[in-house]
Amino acid sequence: MIPLVNVALMRQCDATAVAHRGVEALIHDAGAAVATEARALLGTLYGRRIAVLAGPGLNGADGRVAAGILTSRGCKVDVISVFSQPQELRGYDLVIDAAFGLGCSRPYVAPRVAGGTRVLAVDLVSGVNADTGEVLGHPLAADVTLALGALKPAHLDGPAARLAGELRFASLGIDVPQGSGLVDDQDLAHYVRRGVDDHKWTHALTILAGSPSMPGAAALACRGALSAGASMIHLVSRGKVARVLHLPDEVVRVRGRAIDPRSASVAAGPGLGTTSTSWLLERLSGVTVPVVLDADALTLEVVGLKSSVPRILTPHAKEFARLAGAVPGDQRFDAVRRLAAQTGCVVLLKGPVTVIASPSGELRAVNAGTSALATAGSGDVLSGMIAAAIARGHEPFHAASLSAHLHGRAGALLPPFGSAGDLPDAVTRALAGLRGRDPSDEATTSRHRLNRAGRSRT
């Protein structure tokens, strides 16, 4: 997990690192990381023209160190003070934005940049509030932002997130306490869980899904659950839908009102229809295992059902507004935390950046998704995956976070115009690929690629 912290905590972590290593060593490491990222952006360095917009603080110092390194490698580098910057920068292959970082609290107007010039932001795009993602003035939109030490809310939340471009991360060896964070591939290393005494009921679950008007949602939820490790599924649908669906052998069609006590989790909602509330309440009453509520289960009556078991809500923006009484807006982190605290549930808000919050305020962000997930039924697959991860022994908050990331990674494997029906097989391929990698390969590097183009979720 890549740590995600506010300004106050980042300053504490920076101060501790300076006390142990000295400010010059920290600035050198940051400048070297920026120079490495500049090379990754440009491909070759010799003869390239680079402008470094340097401010008066540590960001400016990082930029000046990077300028020295890039000059030694054959670049033609101009270091430009923000106090004497021109209105426009022309003739450069790359502009390094090292004007203002964490300390930016007033509007900053960046120079215009000629078309075709790449922009690399050091830690943050200059001219944003790092805690809220508020845009202050007229910042440069970055092609790449290299976050230093930890991610800040503005990288992923608020209007400023749209200016960050592709996110990269360099830890610089700064010790940051475990807390909120961005889910990364390394976190999936232990997603698959098996025991020597496993049998078909060990990781069984029940899915309440499907109706005559939306039968396919039940099949997608079941296939999603199987791809994420469910060993047996009891499917309960409205009407006679389950009888006519072509389902894998691990799915047992069940009639009745009671949830099988051998189920380790329940997923409810996909394709049940808007008139299913009383039907659902009858079946969820008395459930003693964690419940994933999605789609047509996301009503105030169902969410408000008194229960002592963990519940996970998985709304998109419109469903979120129905539960919270307002759309999440630009400040999605705070909005999701509020709803989680209000309902006592884990809340997963889908979107280009998916946000997961626990009732205690712990937060995870996922930005692995692609626009391929903006298709009907992809959320049904995710709800099944989360229920399966719980059945495999993951705590509900972690099951939601890890499943959302795996769901995004699977989406990146879909063919052009792939459908939600292709997702379960893609989940299987994604897990096989991730388990075939040595997590230490990426863990030992100083920089990580944290997102991909075209992110979206439904």
Image (tube, rainbow, N blue to C red):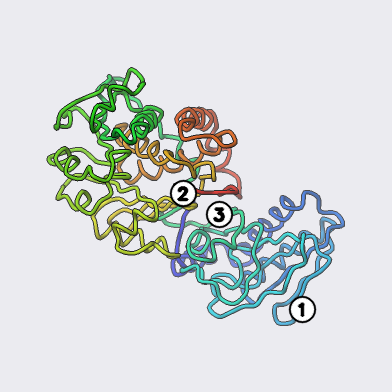
Identify which residue is drawn at 28% across, 28% down.
Answer: 241
Q: Amino acid at mark 2?
A: Val
Pointer 1 and pointer 3: residues touching (CB < 8 Å)?
Answer: no
Q: Is residue 203 visible?
A: no
Quarter of image, res 214: top left
Identify which residue is drawn at 37% across, 31% down.
Answer: 216
SS of the residue under disc 2 = strand
Tell me: 204 left or right of 106.
left
Disc number placed over residue 171 in the picture, else none = 3
Relative to residue 265, is residue 174 depicted above or below?
Answer: below
Real-space Cα separation, disc 1 to disc 3, in angstroms: 33 Å
| Residue count near mark 3 (Cα–Cα under 10 Å), binned few <14, some 14–19, many ≥20 | many
Quarter of image, res 261: top left
The answer to which of 384 and 22 lies nearer the viewer is: 384
Indicate which label's residue lies in the foreground, 1 or 3: 1
Disc number placed over residue 366 in the picture, else none = 2
Quarter of image, res 283: top left
| Residue count near mark 1 (Cα–Cα under 10 Å), binned few <14, some 14–19, many ≥20 | few
SS of the residue under disc 1 = loop
Q: Which residue is mark 1?
A: 86
Residue 47: % across, % down: 87, 57
Indicate which label's residue lies in the foreground, 2 or 3: 2
Pointer 2 and pointer 1: residues touching (CB < 8 Å)?
Answer: no
Tell me: 370 left or right of 261.
right
Count of marks placed on residues: 3
Residue that lies at the very extreme toward the right in this rendered image: 47
Identify which residue is drawn at 67% across, 58% down.
Answer: 34
Identify which residue is drawn at 48% across, 61% down.
Answer: 157
The tag earlier along the polypeptide, 2 or 3, is 3
